[in-house]
Amino acid sequence: MIKDLFLSGKTAIVTGGGGGIGRAIALGLSHAGANVLVNDLGVSVSGDSEARNPADTVVEEIEAQGGRASANHGSVAEAKATEKMVEQALDTFGSIDIVINNAGIIRMGEFPQMSRSDWEAVLRVNLQGSFYLSRAAAPHFRAQAGGAYLHLTSASGLIGSTSQANYAASKLGIVGLSRAIALDLGQHGVRSNCLAPSSTSRMTELTDNARKHLMSPEKYEALKRMRAASAPERIVPLIAYLVSDRARGINGQVFGARGNEIYLYGQHRPVRMMHAAEGWTPAQADERLPAGLGAFATPLEVITDVFTWPPA
């Protein structure tokens, strides 16, 4: 890989940076010239504790390649821990310029059986964790009139997936959070965008196996081919660009990446309007809405219904 120092002199915090997509991002941002605070609590995709913290291993990899990095083992689900992440970045590297909200867990289950604890745990890490770190960095970004957030969202929330009500809600909530940050801080030179990656990871392996029985053999084989073509390293160039100063005109957007593909997601807008001059009644709605709006309704689809072609 040829080094392209888009991020020379910048400091980035990458949450969930110890493995999978987070590891690829941490290594890639370092390769682009950034100092990297690698945060990882050291847990499984369901939030259970593991042995040696993988953040330390990633830091060793970065340093072996001549980069600068520091490990952080705090939980994004704790506001004080995210404040300490920002403090550590400032103390270690003297600045904070980039926040990558990548940390996340998943606990699958059909909606009628989903426990309150599984709902709360996923929202606490995925959505509240993104808020806590974003909020901790915000005063510094505003004071220096610059900074970039990149939040990892998911097609599970943007399009749909089965047995993932908690995960989908958290990931779609991140889009709303990112949009609000972009609107509130854009005037101060701060940018906030989202990326929905399609990539191989411990999480995708878990979710794909869990829903295998719901797919036809053809769809499952297509999904495996898509995963195989979507190594985590392939999304890193897009991320490095989006958090660089060269992307200063891009704010409040939602991107997707799959294999060698980059795409831009649409966001919620009215698509069709009807009115009743004297106001609506239930009977009028029953008579007019199905015919007038039905053709414009969003289909009830899952990810594999939308991405029907192999990655380019």
Image (cartoon, grey):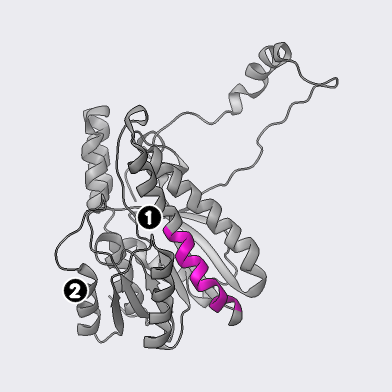
From the top left corner, tell me how far across and down residue 244 is, in percent: 48, 75
Front in this rendered view, residue 175 or 119: 119
Chief secondary structure of the magenta span? helix
| Secondary element at image label 2 | helix
The residue shown at (56%, 75%) is 139
Q: Please rate how many residues cluster around mark 1, counting C-alpha atoms within 10 Å: few if below 14, some from 14 to 19, many from 20.
A: many
From the top left corner, tell me how far across and down residue 6 is, in percent: 43, 79
Magenta highlight range: 129-142
Task: Please give left or right for residue 97 compared with residue 307 in the image.
Answer: right
The residue shown at (24%, 78%) is 59
Location of mark 1 (residue): 125
From the top left corner, tell me how far across and down residue 271 is, in percent: 65, 35
Vertical placement of 68 versus 86: above or below? below
In the rendered image, residue 61 lying in the magenta stretch gets the answer no
Q: Please rate how many residues cluster around mark 2, counting C-alpha atoms within 10 Å: few if below 14, some from 14 to 19, many from 20.
A: some
What number is the disc on residue 57? 2
Tell me where residue 279 sits by quadrant: top right
Task: Please give left or right for residue 168 compared with residue 70 in the image.
Answer: right
Front in this rendered view, residue 117 or 94: 117
Q: Identify the residue at the far left of this view.
A: 51
